[in-house]
Image (cartoon, rainbow, N blue to C red):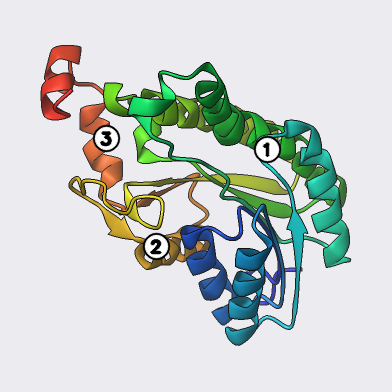
């Protein structure tokens, strides 16, 4: 159960070994989350993230392994993570995703399919079971990491941003389906974030760090907004950009 200040105490994080997820985990633990289950594909990184959670105040941590290339394991991963909490879940975070390399991925049928599987199919499969579990308990919150890139797909990143657009739209509908259940879904739409996935890449305007995203997440969780933008100014920037005529959009994005 959330504490008297509305802060989540029992948390499950899928993609828990990512830089952004680890930054969020540390802030949640500093804000008195005491049980944290971290799920991902790299046991060594998950162990490091679990240790960080303990250093920031968690009293119970555990890990779950899964491969987002295989959606058939999503239900098992969710069940295992929930069972390891052993109590009501306050917050579930989906931070599963793959940026890829557009120039290479678009030339490969297998890599193109993998981008969709990791960024859309696995998260949606997991959300089906998460929804069932949280609706059954009558409470809880889901935070799904989308992207500002989902709002308008760019040619230079159409596999990643297109996949995130699909996830974003599905989650918007899922959020509506949760009305009246006691469960709420929030979308996180960050700009480009400096992480190990973006090392060496160009930094467009509004590029942020993982810690900044985590700070915005904490404020967003407290505000109960349907969408958490990071940085918050992007809400207004994309209100304009999404309506630009296509030729002007391509000029603005250099594509």
Tag of residue 133? none
Q: CA distance from mark 3 to mark 2?
A: 21 Å
Q: Where the N terminus falls, by quadrant?
A: bottom right
User: Up-down: is 163 above or below 198?
Assistant: above
Judged from the image, the secondary structure of the residue bearing numbered disc 2 is helix
Mark 3 Cα shell of 10 Å, populated few (<14), some (14-19), many (≥20): some
Front of the two marks 1 and 2: 2
Mark 1 Cα shell of 10 Å, populated few (<14), some (14-19), many (≥20): few
Badge 1 or badge 3: first in the primary sequence: 1
The quarter holding residue 4 reads bottom right
Front of the two marks 3 and 2: 2
Q: Residue at x 22, y 50 (%)?
A: 206
Residue with the mark numbered 1 = 179
Q: Where the C terminus falls, by quadrant?
A: top left
Q: Residue at x 73, y 39 (%)?
A: 126
Coordinates of residue 36 in the picture (x, y in percent): 70, 69
Q: Is residue 170 visible?
A: no
Give 128 or 97, whichever is nearer the viewer: 97
Coordinates of residue 197 in the picture (x, y in percent): 41, 50
Give 243 or 82, whichever is nearer the viewer: 82
Residue with the mark numbered 3 = 238
Front of the two marks 1 and 3: 3
Coordinates of residue 86 in the picture (x, y in percent): 88, 66
Tag of residue 210? 2
Question: Circles 1 and 3: CB distance less than 8 Å?
Answer: no
User: Up-down: is 112 above or below 41?
Assistant: above
Number of marks in the image?
A: 3
């Amino acid at each position: 159960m959330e504490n008297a200040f509305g802060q989540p105490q029992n948390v499950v994080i899928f993609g828990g070994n990512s830089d952004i997820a680890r930054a969020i985990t540390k802030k949640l633990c500093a804000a008195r989350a005491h049980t944290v289950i971290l799920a991902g594909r790299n046991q060594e990184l998950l162990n490091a993230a679990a240790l960080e959670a303990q250093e920031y105040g968690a009293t119970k941590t555990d890990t779950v392994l899964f491969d987002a290339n295989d959606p058939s394991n999503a239900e098992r991963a969710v069940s295992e993570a929930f069972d390891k909490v052993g109590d009501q879940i306050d917050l579930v975070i989906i931070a599963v995703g793959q940026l890829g390399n557009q120039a290479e991925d678009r030339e490969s049928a297998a890599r193109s399919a993998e981008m969709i599987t990791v960024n859309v199919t696995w998260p949606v499969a997991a959300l089906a079971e998460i929804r069932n579990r949280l609706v059954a308990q009558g409470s809880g919150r889901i935070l799904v990491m989308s992207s500002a890139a989902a709002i308008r797909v760019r040619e230079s990143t159409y596999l990643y941003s297109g996949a995130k657009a699909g996830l974003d739209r599905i989650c918007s509908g899922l959020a509506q389906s949760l009305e009246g259940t006691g469960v709420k879904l929030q979308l996180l739409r960050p700009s480009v974030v400096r992480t190990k996935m973006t090392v060496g890449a160009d930094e467009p305007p509004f590029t942020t760090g993982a810690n900044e995203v985590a700070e915005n997440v904490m404020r967003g969780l407290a505000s109960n907004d349907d969408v958490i933008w990071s940085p918050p100014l992007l809400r207004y920037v994309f209100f304009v950009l999404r309506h630009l005529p296509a030729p002007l959009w391509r000029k603005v994005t250099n594509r």
